[in-house]
Amino acid sequence: MTTTAPVQLPYLQSYPAPLQQQARELLAQGRLGAALLRKYPDAHAVRSDKALYDYAQELKNRHLRNAGTINKVLFDNKIHVVRHALGLHTTVSRVQGNRLATKHEIRIAAMFKQGPDEFLRMIVVHELAHLREKGHGKAFYQLCQHMEPQYHQYEFDLRMYLTHVEHTGERLWGGEPA
Ligand SMILES: [Zn+2]
């Protein structure tokens, strides 16, 4: 008799068992990629750091006008997507003359340069929300949902995509193989 350990799903471990089971079945049937492409057929057109900056700035102006200035937004190919890190938000404060200058930088993992708009928006919204809320508490996720009502659905589907890439090595909207 052999027993097979269930497939590990590190990107989905905080989700309820039935959702993880759904992912396992789609993976086992080789249908996860097709399911994602059917749901998100179109890739976004944000091709450069300049375009990404404008994209983030536009979202910020619409929802978080008074939350400070973002100094820099870029795709970073040094961010390795593991577990939680899809992007990074950093605040650097330094004294300039007699006042404290704060610089906000948002870095998005370069693999999301190729992907649907919904995934990019979810990550940018997450990093923008950190301008106001440092931690990942209730207020943080309320702010994310205020900026993108489908935030939680997009995060789940994005994590399904990471699961697909991890198990198959296949990128769905173009880009370098994993
Ligand atoms: Zn965060």
Image (cartoon, rainbow, N blue to C red):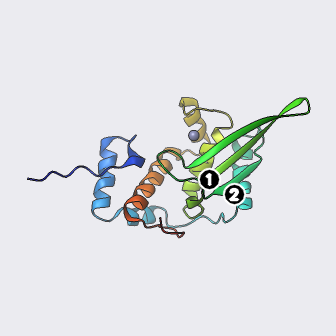
**Nearest to the observer: residue 5 or residue 29:** 5
**Nearest to the observer: residue 104 or residue 151:** 104
The mark found on residue 17 in the picture is none
Task: Indicate the position of residue 94 as horizontal and vertical percent values.
Answer: 80, 35
Q: Determine the residue positioned at 48% across, 68% down.
A: 177
Q: Residues within 10 Å of mark 2 (few under 14, many from 20)?
A: many
Choose mark 1 or mark 2, whichever is in front: 1
Q: Mark 1 highlights which residue?
A: 108
**Nearest to the observer: residue 74 or residue 54:** 74
Task: Indicate the position of residue 130 as horizontal and vertical percent values.
Answer: 64, 38
Q: Quadrant of ligand 1?
A: top right
Task: Indicate the position of residue 19 as horizontal and vertical percent values.
Answer: 34, 47
Under tag 2, what secondary structure? helix
Q: Determine the residue positioned at 53% across, 69% down.
A: 176
Vertically, is 143 above or below 81?
A: above
Under tag 1, what secondary structure? strand
**For residue 18, which quarter of the picture?**
top left
Vertically, is 111 above or below 86?
A: below
Q: Mark 2 highlights which residue?
A: 52
Task: Indicate the position of residue 165 as horizontal and vertical percent values.
Answer: 43, 61
